[in-house]
Image (cartoon, coloured by chain):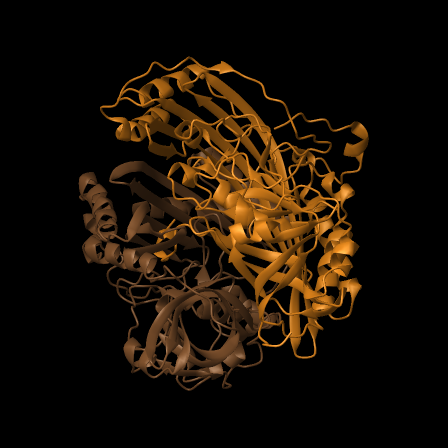
Amino acid sequence: MFNHYFKSDIPRRKFLELGLKGSIALAATPMLLKELLSYSGEMYTKTKLNIDPQILNKTIKKALEKGGDFAEVYVENKISRSILMEESKIKSAVFNISQGAGVRVISGNKTGYAYTEEISEENLIKAAETASYIARGSKKIEPINVRETKRKSFIKIEIPLQYIADEKRIEVMKRANDAALAYDQRIKMAFISYYDEIRGRIIANSEGLLLSDELPLIYFIVQTLGVGNNTRHMGRERVSYHSGFEMFKKVTPEEIARSAARESIAMLKAKDAPAGIMDVVIQNGWGGVLVHEAVGHPLEADNIAKKIGAFTGKLGEKVASDIFTMVDDGTLPNFRGTTNFDDEGTQMKRNVLIKDGVLVKYMSDILSAKQLRMERTGNGRRESFRYYPIPRMTNTFIERGKDKPEDIIASTKKGLYVQSLSGGSVNPITGIFNFTCREAYLIENGRKTIPVKGATLIGSCQQIISNIDAIGDDLAFGPGTCGKGQSAEVTAGQPTVRIRGINVGGSRAKF
Amino acid sequence: MDYKGLIESLVKKCIKKGADGAEVYLQIGRNLRISIRNGEIESIQEAGSHGIGFRVLVKKRMAFSCCNDLSEKALENTIERAIEFAKNTTPDNNNVFPSEKGISKVEGLYDSSIKNIPMEKKIELAKKVEEAAMKDPRITKSAGARYGEGEAEIYLANSNGLLKNYKATGFSFGVSVVAEKGDEKSSGSEFCSRRFFTDLESPEKIGKEAAKKAYEMLDARMVKTQKAAVIFTPDVARAILGGILGAVNGERVLQGASFLANKLGKKIGSALLTVIDDGIRPKGLASAPFDGEGVPTQKRFIIEKGILKGFMYNTIVAKRADVKSTGNASRRGYTSTPGIGPHNFYMEAGEFSPDEIIKATKRGLLVNIITGYGINPVNGNFSGGASGFWIENGKLVFPVKGLTIAGTAHEMFDNIDMIGNDLDLNRSFTTPTFRIKIIQIGGK
């Protein structure tokens, strides 16, 4: 709770190596259930959120008593498990039960927020009073009584997490561990991190909205330590979906582990990376984190409403090369960044942000949509009931192009091939970003050649999207956690792309 | 409420429900956040919170559970969850709880005035810091000012008879602004954090500093790719200290996942390099009388005059390494099991003023922003984005941005040749200004 002790630059967003979060129809077929080791009947007395709509109405009324033009109650509860395996041992197992409710009041550009961990009428009313402080003396509105609403679902579940025995969770971890160690003798250790949660939400507001749902989430991360002569490399692979346990059938623990191990071994041969400006080809998949940072964050409407964002006033203008189209789509089935509705209750949508190089849309929450007089795009998200929602990305990607990935490499005479990126950050005001490569190779005469050590890529967002001159037809995605004062589950994606002239931070002067 | 009595009885309850050993960690807190923009309140957020974590040991297997519902039924359910979960972890003889009963004396962790500071005064502080930063004509926009305060009480008990508690406060405020010139934008922020409200710097000083950071970087250029001296300012301490911290984690050392694993007692850098971890510094932002599992904290050398002196341990990892816990069990609140982490972690001051270091530099880079992950703790490789000022003949000549710097930890530590006298221990993770004689810079 004392994280504000560290001196930090507010606008910097960092990708954290953490996972968090989590409605839906439970549709386990008897056949699937039989495959489970045992049936562990979760005590769901508390997960099924249930609250009298009259209490919600009273809380909203109280919140708007002193004035204000919008009030909301957000109730959440979450059950999570996080298990860590290192050195072939189950080192840590954490079971977390959390619940709480937040009350928000918006009055003009001001936000008041308070939360309580005890979900009772008394505490909700108290939170409403605290949150209403900022609206003193402003114009009053009469809230509309809440009515239950339904939203379309983008998340299908076959094997609900509620029915999974802990032994099953451990089994997938062991399978990953075994596959990693079997990959190559030089893999000395695997770090397997398993996280799952079930998050229940109720959202009610002064516009009369009342929504509830319950979503599962799984985040599985394998890191492998490769040790060579005087060198080490930690490889990584992550898989995450809002899904039931069937996720491990679609992508097996062994595949995940082997992917991490492959990176560890390949990078043991890495040489020093060159320094200076060069052409960079980024492989399809998680590399989309580059546009997440460099373009996505500057397109979040909060900084645009404050008129400080790098893309302020650029709506309808040409900002990128003609072949560049970028989308934020919260409806991709079961994706890590997908929910049925955002944390303010807005239906998730597919939002085209930049179309053929022209800026067409920002990503908004309720407040910034009002400030900019734009639509609500379904990007109002929050880490938990302890935070009020702000504009965040969901699943963000560069739309597929026409080029063949192999032609992109072949037509690059000299440059850097980035197979995967660790993550990065951007200053959304200046648009200056940085990324760290996990796995990269030199491109020499149109061919991918030797691996090079983790180099940093830096530049400005405007420059990157103007300098993209080739986009492949091989769109793919990867999961991650995005930090912007609070964390959010996201997916980033892209086809293979080439960007001309990025500054690469290597440790040797000559290419 | 008698929290001591509560956690003591909960330890007993864990044992009664089948645990061989147990630890209960209770955290109670309150925090307030105010944000101001253009002289108006943008948001006020206030909440009290509490939560409790249970670590149980069943047949040498350890598991953890936590909840934020302190009702008797919820607590019992949570304990049962931990005991149930422990069936699945791996048994380990090193799984023990500490038995060190004492606590270290640390002055100045709690400011009792926190209850009496009027809301208006806090709002005023955030307004004033924004005003001070906006005073400079080169500053065109405010990205917002903030005030934050928090207080927390920690209670810890375990089945070895430990029963300890302490409370602490923290205050911080700062501002972030934008300078513009034509199409060019530059942002700057400055913050100040203290244990005591009255120790906070003046809003004028903090605001002025934020403004300076924004406008002085306008008209930044790029330089050619080259090797040159690089001067690190305290603002980029994390780039060098982060990698050291990751590499002296006792567990990573045992696992061979640290570039410092085989270097204990050996020279790993310049004789000027001394790094200290201090858990007992009065009013220290990362000080505490005991660590995340109740072991008394201490002040110790990590690197002394270039020699690697020690790693960091919690109780379990210390037992495995056959050493004593260094009091570095760290917890991110009641929801986390104790890992290994620092207290006030810093590089010792040297003899030169920052100006003298600049004057002594014929050609090089003064870096005040480094982006990226810093030194990789596993293999010691370093690469980051850099901006700051270019130095020619001992003078700052123009601002630079979009550069990279890269090398290895080994090369960086060896080449430290001047250290500044400007160490500010009000920061909990910091260095003075220091110079690395030569390192690769990437640019045009």
Could you tell me residue A303's position as x and y percent?
A: 41, 41
The structure residue drawn at horizontal position 48% and vertical position 28%, both measured from the top left corner, is A344
Instruction: State which quadrant residue B41 falls in.
Output: top left
Q: In the rendered image, is residue B150 in sight?
A: no
Q: How many marks?
A: 0
Instruction: Choose between B74 and A407: the one closer to the eye.
Output: A407
Instruction: State which quadrant residue B49 falls in.
Output: top left
Chain A: what color? orange
Instruction: State which quadrant residue A413 falls in.
Output: bottom right
Quarter of the image containing the N terminus of chain B? top left
The structure residue drawn at horizontal position 74% and vertical position 71%, both measured from the top left corner, is A186
Could you tell me residue A374's position as x and y percent?
A: 47, 27
Chain B: what color? brown
| B79 shown above or below B323 | above
Could you tell me residue B437's position as x and y percent?
A: 44, 82
The structure residue drawn at horizontal position 42% and vertical position 14%, both measured from the top left corner, is A54
Instruction: Choose between A247 and B93: the one closer to the eye.
Output: A247
Instruction: Choose between A277 and A433: the one closer to the eye.
Output: A277
Could you tell me residue B227's position as x and y percent?
A: 50, 79
Horizontal side of B176 relative to B25 (left or right) equals: left
Q: In the rendered image, is residue B404 in sight?
A: yes
